[in-house]
Image: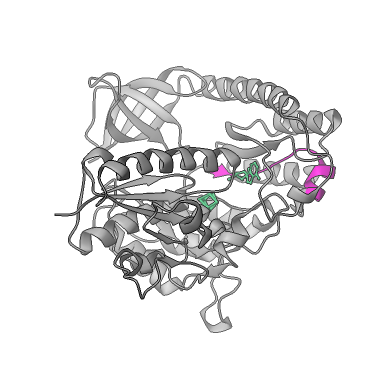
């Protein structure tokens, strides 16, 4: 029997696509190998958003090449954004790769894997199929991704996504709600709504089928059984009053928001083509906090964008302080081929970028520790993810604010418990179960 192993790089969208890739391979009669060593089909689902992603992937492909020299029957398949960005060159530059698909062509995976001398080993360029419509294999029984849209219409000057994932296409609302109902009937209690720009959902739908992101949040909230709704990633420009109201008024929508800031300097934001400035961003944060006082707010920040001065960076630190984020993903700017910013003068030296990143990370940790300390003494509703990695007696789970919480006594995976928080670090909360809420 053919046994596959999928390695996933990149964002949640890729994690979601990998579930579809596994589902398709299983539907084709293959089984998943317990590890890559025992697989005879290696699939790499790739990302190209930052240089580091490219480096890690090329390393992994080189390891696979070594194995293929010893085991010529090994099949090597590359899917995802990096595959799209290099397209057919992949077969010239990495001749040991057997087949490749871009993120819009996952449905063609079996065809390219079975290609012979007369058919194509690569499928790229079209963005017609929603991976959501393909068979799937969920990793967790109580949690699921729900794809709302594909692609992105923004033109952020640093970002490769629009060129590898195409323009935004929203999925039909009836299909989304049918999938959400189906998930609920299978016992899923938490859904994470996915889109490259999730809250511009619906703008491209025909007038008779139109539905806004806010309306969709309310419709999913109304589904029995779905108790936690999260979404990622929204764009600040589309975070309007109706979305904030729908979040605040829908009991199932979690008190959590990931709202990418990217930079605190209005001058840099303009060069990034983010279409908001730092003042508007902070006003937005104030409105969100007013509607949801206990919201946990996280963000993405890029340091070292071309031309970023010390003053610009200070602005990022100032805005970070004022927004008082719970956490942040911090990135060092890396030039991506074909993006506008890759052509900007004033690319910064690596040591300066690293030095700024270090200062930002210190501030991120400081706020994270403070925000978590403020939760000591509170009771949090925690969804159990089972025993912690280090100690089977201790369970781990997530609060509605998406904070990792370690607690005792243990509760089965998928159960919701009330936990009194007794201790915290910048990364985790710790506490005792005071009562089981539901099973
Ligand atoms: N360099 C560094 N970080 C980037 N991101 C996107 N493109 C780049 C780039 N060229 C970051 C952004 C985005 C996150 C997913 O990755 O912060 O929100
Ligand atoms: Fe996700 Fe963007 Fe990376 Fe593609 S390039 S995997 S969309 S983060």
Direction top: furthest residue = 423
Residue 96, compared with residue 174, is above or below; it is above
**Residue 380: percent from left, percent from top:** 41, 31
Residue positioned 50% across, 24% down in the render: 375
- Identify the residue shown where x is 78% and y is 42%: 278
Image colouring: one colour
Q: Which residues are magenta?
A: 256-271
Q: Residue 176, percent across and down?
A: 41, 67
Asked if residue 231 shows in the view, the reply is yes
- Ligand 1 located in image quadrant: top right
The answer to whether 95 is drawn above or below residue 206 in the figure is: above
Toward the left, the furthest residue is: 1
Image location (x, y in percent) of residue 426: 52, 21
- Which is more toward the observer, 75 or 28? 75
Q: Residue at x 43, y 65 (%)?
A: 122
Left/right of residue 354 with respect to residue 418 in the rendered view = right
Query: Picture coordinates of residue 49 (x, y %)?
Result: 58, 47
Say which quadrant the N terminus sits in.
Answer: bottom left
Instruction: Tell whether 216 sits left or right of 114.
Output: right
Q: Tell me the quarter of the picture where residue 378 sits.
A: top left
- Is 181 left, or right, of 3 in this rendering? right
> Residue at position x 39%, y 34% from top?
398
Q: Quadrant of the C terminus?
A: top left
Q: Nearer the viewer, residue 313 or 255?
A: 313
Question: Does 315 appear in magenta?
Answer: no
Res 35 visible: no
How many labels were placed on the picture?
0
- Residue placed most toward the observer, 361 or 290: 361
Residue in front for this viewpoint, 277 or 85: 85
């Amino acid at each position: 029997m053919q046994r596959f192993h999928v390695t996933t790089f990149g964002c949640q969208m890729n994690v979601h696509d990998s579930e579809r890739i596994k589902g398709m391979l299983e539907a084709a009669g293959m089984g998943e190998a317990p590890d890559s060593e025992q697989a005879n089909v290696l699939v790499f689902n790739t990302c190209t958003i930052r240089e580091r992603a490219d480096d890690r992937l090329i390393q992994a492909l080189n390891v696979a090449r070594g194995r293929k020299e010893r085991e010529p029957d090994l099949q090597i398949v590359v899917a995802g954004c990096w595959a799209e960005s290099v397209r057919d060159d992949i077969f010239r530059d990495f001749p040991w790769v057997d087949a490749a698909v871009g993120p819009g062509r996952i449905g063609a995976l079996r065809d390219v894997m079975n290609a012979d001398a007369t058919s194509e080993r690569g499928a790229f360029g079209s963005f017609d199929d929603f991976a959501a419509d393909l068979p799937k294999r969920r990793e967790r029984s109580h949690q699921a991704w729900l794809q709302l849209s594909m692609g992105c219409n923004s033109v952020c000057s640093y970002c490769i996504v629009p060129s590898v994932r195409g323009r935004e296409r929203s999925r039909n609302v009836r299909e989304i709600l049918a999938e959400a109902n189906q998930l609920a009937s299978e016992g899923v209690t938490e859904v994470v709504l996915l889109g490259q720009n999730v809250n511009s959902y619906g703008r491209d739908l025909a007038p008779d089928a139109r539905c806004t992101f806010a309306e969709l949040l309310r419709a999913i909230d109304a589904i029995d059984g779905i108790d936690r709704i999260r979404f990622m990633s929204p764009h600040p420009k589309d975070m309007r009053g109706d979305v904030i109201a729908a979040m605040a008024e829908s009991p199932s929508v979690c008190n959590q928001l990931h709202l990418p800031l990217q930079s605190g300097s209005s001058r840099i934001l303009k060069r990034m083509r983010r279409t908001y400035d730092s003042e508007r961003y902070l006003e937005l944060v104030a409105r969100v906090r007013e509607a949801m006082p206990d919201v946990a707010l996280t963000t993405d920040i890029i340091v070292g964008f071309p031309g970023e001065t010390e003053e610009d960076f200070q602005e990022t630190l100032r805005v970070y302080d004022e927004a008082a984020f719970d956490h942040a993903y911090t990135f060092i700017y890396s030039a991506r081929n074909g993006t506008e910013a890759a052509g900007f003068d004033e690319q910064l030296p690596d040591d300066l970028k690293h030095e700024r990143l270090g200062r930002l990370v210190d501030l991120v940790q400081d706020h994270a520790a403070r925000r978590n300390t403020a939760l000591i003494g509170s009771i949090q509703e925690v969804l159990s993810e089972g025993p912690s990695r280090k100690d089977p007696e201790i369970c781990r789970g997530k609060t509605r604010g998406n904070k990792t919480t370690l607690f005792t006594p243990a509760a089965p995976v998928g159960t919701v418990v009330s936990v009194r928080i007794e201790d915290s670090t910048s990364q985790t909360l710790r506490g005792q179960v005071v009562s089981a809420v539901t099973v």
